[in-house]
Amino acid sequence: MSQVIYKLGDDISTDIIYPGRYMATVLPTETQQFAFADIKTLNEKLNTKQFTPGSVITAGKNFGCGSSREQAVSTLKGYEIIIIARSFARIFLQNSINLGLQIITCPDIEANEGDELDVTEKEIINKTSGKSFRIEPMPKSRQAIIDAGGLIAYTRKRIMEKQSRRG
């Protein structure tokens, strides 16, 4: 069971997720504090850890639009949250896969802050409203990369598996 900690609208750009004025700060250990810096209530909630790992931020269409900055993904990954959106911008989607950010595409999601969600392989059940919503499944190859924690972790795992089969 996951709780929605914040609800965002459509067209949330990478500049909203990780404002450009912080681009001089690129270490993932330092970028987290600037996630949603201009949405004060969400930034404070994240920085004071007023949520549990596996909590959810919901969004509308085109989440992560704008620039290709990878920091927009890495800054969120450190919080161990799930992003559920109606759709994701193409580059943000690929960066999320590469870095292992838990994302779910759910075109009809209806959930408000505080709602309890049960996320299954095929649907999201909003326990608060009683409604359920179909998930657009990630291709298995892409999901395997996310589940491994990102492309580097996935590649490392595959190399280790090959070496153990040989040895």
Image (cartoon, rainbow, N blue to C red):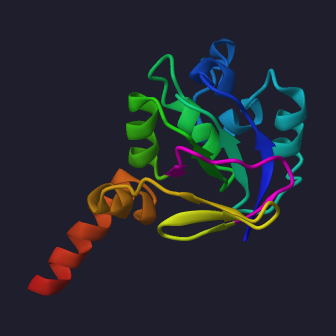
Q: Is residue 139 above or below residue 43?
A: below
Left or right: 130, with 70 as reference point? right
Farthest top residue in view: 21
Left or right: 167, with 140 as reference point? left
**Which residue is painted at 41% across and 65% down in the image?**
148
Q: Position of residue 150 (x, y in %)?
A: 41, 54
Examine the structure image and report whether residue 33 is included in the region drawn in magenta.
no
Q: Is residue 7 above or below residue 150?
A: above
Q: Is residue 29 visible?
A: no
Q: Position of residue 138 (x, y in %)?
A: 37, 55
Of residue 129 and residue 88, the one placed in the foreground of this image is: 129
| Magenta residue span | 101-117
Farthest left residue in view: 166
Q: Position of residue 90 (x, y in %)?
A: 39, 30
Quarter holding the C terminus is: bottom left
**Which residue is painted at 30% across and 63% down in the image?**
140
